[in-house]
Amino acid sequence: MTRSPNRPGPASALRFATELVAWVATPWALAGHSVLLAVASVVVLVALPTVFATPGDKEQVLVPVPGQVTIGLVLLHMAAAAVASWLAWPLPAAITVWILVAASVLAELPRWRWLICAPVHATV
């Protein structure tokens, strides 16, 4: 079994930047509606990828899941960043986030191809 292309590099840097935007923009956008919902959004966005991961894609996996779940978690962050930035910030900032998300999607494609084929119980 080959290892995931999830190595330090441009793709992981773009993904991390997108995650950071999601962690900041989502509660920012939700805080006006509910502080509890804003806090819950950060807990969900941080906890899910910490707990669930595809073996071979991360060094330590608490709960192994198929690659499609990992892709879904990344897409959740990207969608949260894109939508929340649009709702929370001025147009130039939101456009910048959309460009970041688009670049991240393109950079993630090799990893996603690997994740689609990765067995759940792969050994690291």
Image: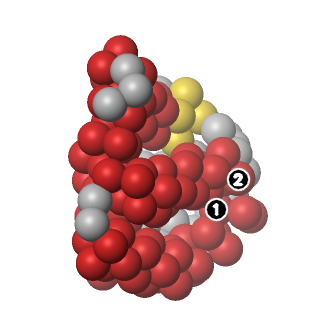
Does any portion of residue 6 appear in the rendered image? yes
Does any portion of residue 13 appear in the rendered image? no
* Nearer-the-camera pick, 123 or 36: 36
What residue is at 61 percent from the left and 69 percent from the top? 112
**Rendered position, 120 above or below 30:** below
The answer to which image quadrant residue 28 occupies is top left
User: What residue type is disc 2 on?
Assistant: Gln
Crowd band around label 2 with a 10 angstrom C-alpha radius: few (<14), some (14–19), many (20+): some
User: What residue type is disc 1 on?
Assistant: Leu
**Rendered position, 4 above or below 54:** below
Residue 68, label in figure: 2
Could you give the CA–CA distance between mark 1 and mark 2, rounded to whole angstroms? 7 Å
Q: Which one is earlier in the sequence, the residue at label 1 or at label 2? A: 2
- Residue placed under numbered mark 1 in the picture: 115
**Rendered position, 33 above or below 118:** above
Q: What element carries label 1?
A: helix
Quadrant of the drawing holding the N terminus? bottom right
At which x and y percent is residue 15?
A: 37, 65
What residue is at 35 percent from the left and 15 percent from the top? 36
Q: What element carries label 2?
A: helix
At which x and y percent is residue 48?
A: 48, 32
Between disc 1 and disc 2, the foreground one is 2
Asked if residue 10 lies left or right of residue 112, the reply is left
What residue is at 35 percent from the left and 42 percent from the top? 29
Asked if labels 2 and 1 touch by Cβ distance under 8 angstroms, the answer is yes
Crowd band around label 1 with a 10 angstrom C-alpha radius: few (<14), some (14–19), many (20+): many
